[in-house]
Amino acid sequence: MNVVVLVGGQSSEREVSLSSGKAVYDALVRKGYKAAIFDPGAASSDTGTDRLPPGPLWMIRSSTVLNSDAVFVALHGGSGENGQVQCLLDLAGKKYTGSGMLASAMAMDKALTKRLMGMVDVFTPEHALFRAEASEELISIGSEILERFNLPLIVKPNDGGSTIGLTKVTEPEQIEHALRGCFDESSQILVENYIEGRELTVAVLDGEPLPVVEIRPKEGLYDYSAKYTKGKSDYLVPAPIDDQKAASMQRDAAELYRLLGCKGVVRVDFIMDHSGTCYCLEVNTSPGMTELSLVPMAARDVGMSFDDLVDRLVRLATK
């Protein structure tokens, strides 16, 4: 079977995607697939294709993609995760891993996902969505935030990932800097109460939740550096928490998977405060697949190797 791995892209998570894609490609080769890597964010070199600018449209016109039996979407963030690439693959009649256009678009919109959480009684931190068309609006937005929220709080892009553009605000004078960092990534700014507690995550594979993973950053927030630098975080699988709490998070994660209409594997992030209350933060429809990624960790705990996980995702896409 010919499988093309989509990697890179043009989002801020490009480097992570390149790492994920290389790991997936190697696993496919070991499993006996005829695999190829394709980066829609690179300059066009596809024979017989006009020199189009990098981006999803060029990707879908590539003979590399069109001649494949299946596409493994290892893109993170931007058009690779917000439904655009999924829409183009649907139009091209290609089978691909992960969630479809609608589920991807809804999950990428964190504020919308939080509204859906409320419909099924899944706790999420108090939050609000702000939109800025120009940087000049950030000062007034900052004033409104400080009137509505108590500190500390989290400021992050509503449609971003890998904690890029995320800031914890503990003092009023930090709000403008946080908003500008977020605005560099997105015009949609999500603000939510900061919940101090334990970082937890649940992967859901084909509708079935995997064991809960606990993430313990060695210092500060579980930010980009803590996620992707070896030795900056510890991971406990399964998480050392009460069985009932774990089962509750797994049920919530599986319910959100079904509610959004997800496919393949997703990762649902939680935080448990000091009283034991669990809050759901977001749903990731294209979770990382690097050696430090959380989904492969959870899969290993139930006896599924990384290569078997990749193979399972391709089979789910093509069945």
Image (cartoon, helix red, strand yellow):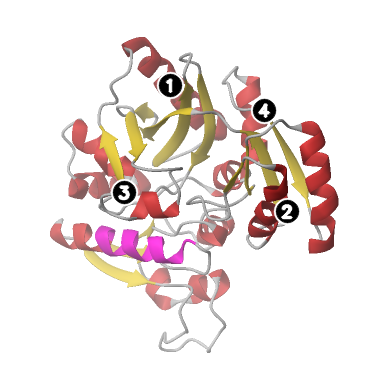
Q: Which residues are magenta?
A: 13-24
Residue 224 vs 243, above or below: the answer is below
Quick one: label 3 or label 2, which is nearer the N terminus? 2
Amino acid carrying mark 4 in the image: Glu
Amino acid carrying mark 2 in the image: Glu
In the image, residue 168 lies at what x, y percent? 58, 43
Label 3: which residue? 232
- Residue 6 seen in the figure: no
Which one is nearer the viewer's eye here, 174 or 278?
174
Q: Residue at x 45, y 89 (%)?
A: 48
Which one is nearer the viewer's eye here, 10 or 152?
152
Within-10-Å neighbours for mark 4: few <14, some 14–19, many 20+: some
Quick one: label 1 or label 2, which is nearer the N terminus? 2
Q: Are marks 4 and 1 in contact (CB under 8 Å)?
A: no
Residue 173 vs 274, above or below: the answer is below
- Which mark lies nearer to you, 3 or 4? 3
Quick one: label 2 or label 4, which is nearer the N terminus? 4
Q: Tag 2, which secondary structure?
A: helix
Within-10-Å neighbours for mark 3: few <14, some 14–19, many 20+: some
Label 1: which residue? 249
In the image, residue 148 lies at what x, y percent? 79, 32
Quick one: label 3 or label 1, which is nearer the N terminus? 3
